[in-house]
Amino acid sequence: MRRQAIFCLLLQLIFELSSCTHLRVAPGTTLKLPCVSFQTDFYAETITWQFNGGDIGAQSLSSAAVKKDGLYLSISPVTTAHEGTYVCSVKKNDMELIRIYNITVVASIGYEIKVNQGSDVHLPCNLPPSSRVETNALWFKETGGGRKTLLNQEGTASDDSPRVNLRFPLDHDQSITIGETVMEDAGIYHCESVEGQKLSSVYLSVVVPPTLAPYSCSGFLTPWEPCQDENSRIGGPLLQESMTEFSMKLYSYIRESNPTTNLLFSPISISMALSHLLLGARGDTRKAIQTAVCVPHDFHCVHFQMKKLREKLSSSLQIASQIYYNPQISLNESFANQSMQFYEAQPVRLLETSEKNTQMINEWVANKTKHKITHLIDFVSPNAQIILLNAVSFSGQWKVKFAQKHKKGLFSKLDGDLVPVPLLYHRKYMATMTYVVELKAQVARFSLTGDSSLYIVLPRDSKASDLQEVEVKMTDTAVHQMIEQMKTTPPQHIEVTLPQIKLNVEPDMNILLKKLGLSSLFEGGNLCGLYSEDQLVLDDAKHRAFLELNERGVEAAAATSMSFSRSFPSFSALRPFIMLLWSDQANVPLFIGRVTDP
């Protein structure tokens, strides 16, 4: 009878000690791994622990210690170095019993996301802000038994599965989108750098969606509420602060996606176009757009203040913002009226063919920009429901003229290459120049007609790291401080050398809108104030900015850089620099750009 009892006990031990346990543990926690989970006097002789095939004692595994003669293994705190396979071995006479643990150390940033079947879902992941983005992160999905499947760097599981995509390639935001989720998409996903650093882990669950009520705009049909205090003294300054905050947020997003190329955009044009769309947004979509353009949710006077700002800038800045819509729909009358009232833009119906729509839109843009931009779009989809357009043109003359004699110089690019450029030169140009400690950069201000100024921010050297250091420091607060500091700095004679520049740049507005938190516009946001009979989807968004810097002045924007020589300070724009075209009258940025290759 005793022999039978021992045999049964041995079967129980063999079953338990031969089992494999999979554990997911967060860094910084304490972990205790028992060799067996019940009391018995069977194991009394030899208990050993191994980690990834080697003796734990021999490996000197940090923070891991065998306790109570091997009865359990203690790890505190857990780090990524503790990820792997642990084997507990119990030996007595001619028998060996084992227990196996597979430990996965999940990223410190963990997410649990629940999504309805058939919907799109975004899985978040971000590279460290201080890192340079040279390669995309790697995404994996756990497949059970400690194994995982790699999603390639383009974010696509295979050529047959285009539903998985990297949202912003070569960007600090390495999130992926899984489109039209199915039940098989549920599981655990990991995001890692190419060096193996864990960046994010996501537990995704896919559920059957509840039966949705028919689409309805009930409760969202009232027009945008009127501004109750048009004479308020805080409305204007509030919008100015919001514009600067929005501008620098846009710049940070654009430079992340384009770390070394020329940049140019008009934050005031993009802000006005989004505010125009805000007229028709309701519910969560309204809040999302207000957050995107950095205005408070209770700031009902945003459109009134935008109109005043537009009027202030009309003498020097041509702003083109418009909404075209599918002729199959009928826009709400209140939206059409307020669109004219605040933005001088009557919503326009698209024509019957793609060719006619393309020609109509490009001719409108050319007219609004004095033919500086003659081609904005290549094609209008027959399925287009809404097209959001942006185009801006600025003309400002130098208050101090440059010499008409043409000279040439060499511009030093980020990679050290020298390229010849035509120059603007003045031996004793009257301008304001100072060193801004907060930016660690030299800054010069050049006065222009139309109550505007060109600010040129010059990093310490032409290296990419110096440029990026200044860009990181250029927050809205730092820019406002820079503007105020330059106002109190007296002008002086400076030897100025500027490159003649002509830029025509089109940032990706679709990516920008998504980074601004407005993905819902592409998926079907609440635009009941614009059209109430069905849900609308944004088909495309465009923005193009033009810049020319010549002996007459600035067309749209300009830039330069800084050094010292001889008896006069010298300002030489022959290496990469950052530029801000600023309205002194309205106290808002009109254009922001970067020149790395003239």
Image (cartoon, rainbow, N blue to C red):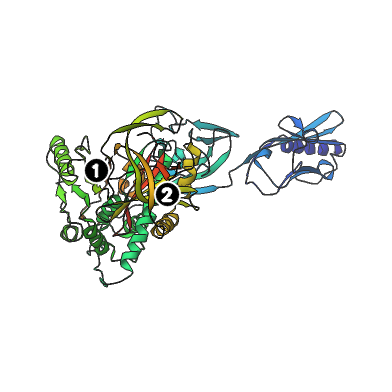
Quadrant of the image containing the C terminus: top left
What residue is drawn where x is 33% and y is 56%? 588
Real-space Cα separation, disc 2 to disc 1, in angstroms: 22 Å
Residue bearing the label numbered 1? 552
Residue in the image at 70% along x and 49% along y: 30
Residue 564 is situated, as x and y percent measured from the top left of the image, at: 46, 43
| Three-letter amino acid code at the position of disc 1 | Arg
x 40%, y 31%: residue: 161
Q: Quadrant of residue 351?
A: top left
**Residue sitting farthest toward the front:** 567
Q: Nearer the viewer, residue 220 or 557?
A: 557
Q: How many labels does the image show?
A: 2
Q: In this view, does 71 lie to the left or right of 170?
A: right
- In the rendered image, residue 528, in percent from the top left (x then y), is placed at 24, 57
Closer to the camera in the image, 260 or 173:
260
- 208 left or right of 22? left
- Which of 527 and 562 lies nearest the eye of the viewer? 562
Q: Is residue 293 left or right of residue 463?
A: left
Residue type for callout 2: Val
Above-or-below relation of 468 to 421: below
State which quadrant residue 380 falls in.
Answer: top left
Q: Is residue 554 visible?
A: yes
Which one is in front, 512 or 597? 597
Q: Mark 2 points at which residue?
A: 443
Asked if one can make out residue 186 in the rendered structure from this viewpoint, the answer is no
**Mark closest to the chain's N terminus, 2 or 1:** 2
Residue 308 in the image, given as x and y percentages of width and height: 24, 62
Q: Residue 335 carries which label?
A: none
